[in-house]
Image: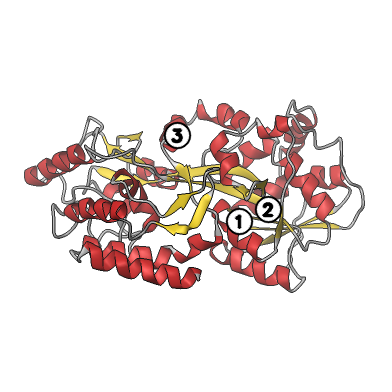
Amino acid sequence: MRTRHAAVATGVALVLAVTACSSDPADPTTDADTTGGELVIWVDPNRAGVLAQFQDQIEADLGVSLVIEEHPPDDLQSTFVTASQQGAGPDVTVGAHDWIGNLVRNGTVDPVQLSDPALAEFPEVAIEAVTFEGQTYGVPYALENLALIRNTELAPDAPATIEELVETGQQLQDSGDASEIMCLQVGDQGDTYHIYPLFTSGGGYLFGTTADGTWDPSDLGVDSDASKAAFEQIRELGEAGVGALKRSISGDNAIPTFTDGDCAFLVSGPWAVNDVKEAGIEYDITPVPPFEAGDTAEPFVGAQTFFVASRGENKAVAQEFVANYLTSTELAVALYEAEPRPPALTSALEQVQSADPDLAKFIEAAEYGSPMPSIPEMAAIWGPFGTAQAAIIGGADVDEALDAAAQAIAEQID
């Protein structure tokens, strides 16, 4: 259902006045295309409310009617691809940067041209995330990554290594102060996103890279010797080892188990912080520690991104919108306030982090991370890799599980 949002919320006039005087590198009032018509944006409910606050200003600047359609985030990518291919899609949509490969392969998004000053307003990792085959697809507005959230009453000191974490967790179990060594969601289907820091610390890799640093889907590393060695260490943490990783810890109960005080360590993202605060937990946030003899534990870094649809009816205005408004500090801060993920725009991050020191800690953890691969072949990883992970944590043979996963992934890629 197409919903035309009504006008502006209380106090927006002040915000818009500030926007008009903004010192942002791209002034939205300077190059607006006044071709008329509609600018249709598909977005999830949280972002829809924020865009609605700016609706009058956007319409005045760009000379269009802004149409904001709300879509459930879980279905947005597939709905967008299907609708775009049928000529019924929007001009702009929002999603995670790792959609890019699939969206480009399906011919549904266009590159976005950002000026050098605009590019400089974002950290390198954010621009790297939205860069695919040498071109920038979309404008990032928020970053997200995993870190270690620690109950400081149970564990006052941050562990330097996974081994230290396990030792502390076992001591808490022995004393009866905690029932779990750590809370890292696995579940029956595995969870590639959450195990990735330990996988990389153990030396594993999903795809190799080419000489210019781009992902190389022909170099599938899932069943490499390095990845098998990483999973031997992960297996030791699992149910056949020390029991720090369990299939019974899933996406449904990992955060509640932590907030109930049943474990001292939670591997999660900024979306967990509100629950931790509401539970009254004394906490700190640090990077996910590595294995004692391992490499850096690299979390995936994701970038929530606004994309320009290739088959939109108002592409010029869509380009104008993402290139100018998404580099607006005021809009970036408003998006943060709707959902407190670290803003990708540096000026917005600097504005909000003084009142939210947790953001700086997640950003610090992101410095150890790497952008999630945005190549289309990444879609083949999740299911087989997760299945192998869950099996190994349950005690399965590493060689057999990873060989089967690699074969299943390769069949999908071919």
Q: Is residue 266 left or right of residue 136?
A: left
Q: Secondary structure at mark 1?
A: helix
Q: Quadrant of the N terminus?
A: bottom right
The image quadrant that residue 105 belongs to is bottom right
Q: Is residue 186 left or right of residue 313?
A: left
Residue positioned 45% across, 29% down in the render: 357
Q: Earlier in the sequence, mark 2 or mark 1?
A: 1
Q: CA distance from mark 2 to mark 1?
A: 9 Å
Q: CA distance from mark 2 to mark 3?
A: 25 Å
- Closer to viewer: mark 2 or mark 1: 1
| Neighbours of disc 1 within 10 Å: few (<14), some (14-19), many (20+) | many
Residue positioned 50% across, 71% down in the render: 414
Which residue is at the front of the view, 59 or 127? 127
Amino acid type, mark 3:
Glu
Q: Are marks 1 and 3 in contact (CB under 8 Å)?
A: no
In this view, which residue lies farthest toward the front? 211
Q: CA distance from mark 1 to mark 3?
A: 22 Å
| Neighbours of disc 2 within 10 Å: few (<14), some (14-19), many (20+) | many
Q: Are marks 2 and 3 in contact (CB under 8 Å)?
A: no
